Amino acid sequence: MLARDGLGGTVDVHYLPAHLHNRPDGITPGVEAVLDAHPGRPTFVAYADCGTGGHLDAMLARHPGVGRLPGAHCYEMFAGEQLFARLHDEEPGTFFLTDFLARHFDALVWQGLGLDRHPQLLATYFGNYRRVVLLTQSADAAVVDAGRVAAERLSLTFEHRHVGRLGLAPVTTAVSVAVGRSAA
């Protein structure tokens, strides 16, 4: 349970395994299992499309009133649509990191993609990338250091953009509306 100012009450948070971002075919069934376990409750899904190829939205259409994060992925949501588009247009070969992904780079990227066991896959996975852009929400210097180390391990240039949590403002409003409906 999570109580947040401005949300009008208590919010239940159900986490899915972070590794699903490496296996996006598991996101839709994972989210649907949570929704099916809590039918009729106002719900907001904290996933963008995240590589589901539209399957998440198709499933959510069967669950009226359930919203989700906007955009194709969390990078766009954190950076904002305009900054993300500009960063992508500047260099389409950009690998993006968030605070969480920088902190857990070894487990989610290096080991998650099998690079610890098969380093020869580095060129296959990252051969078309040119840079790493770390989009931080916090001001934690350790996160920036972790992002820099990740870029070095991938042999890519490093860029850091502190984007804060402003991209979450529309999401907070949507969650507040969903929670407010449950009280009515």
Image (spheres, grey):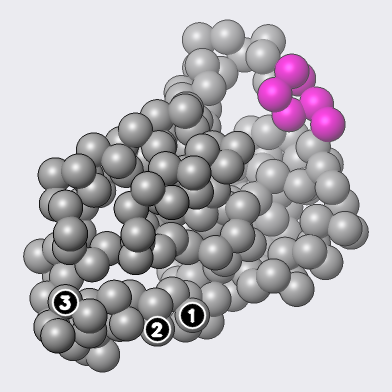
Judge depth for marks 3 and 2 and give the one in front.
3
Going by the numbered disc 2, the residue's amino acid type is Thr
- Name the mark on residue 170: 1
Q: Residues within 10 Å of mark 2 (few under 14, many from 20)?
A: few
Q: Residue at x 14, y 85 (%)?
A: 184
Would residue 145 appear left or right of 132 to someone viewing this image?
Answer: left
Q: Which residue is mark 3?
A: 182
* Residue 50 in view in this figure: no
| Main secondary structure of the magenta stretch | helix
Q: Which residue is mark 2?
A: 173
What distance separates the C-alpha of mark 3 from that of mark 1?
19 Å
Q: Residues within 10 Å of mark 3 (few under 14, many from 20)?
A: few
Going by the numbered disc 1, the residue's amino acid type is Pro
Pointer 3 and pointer 2: residues touching (CB < 8 Å)? no
Give the magenta range.
123-128
Q: Earlier in the sequence, mark 3 or mark 2?
A: 2
Quarter location, residue 152: top right
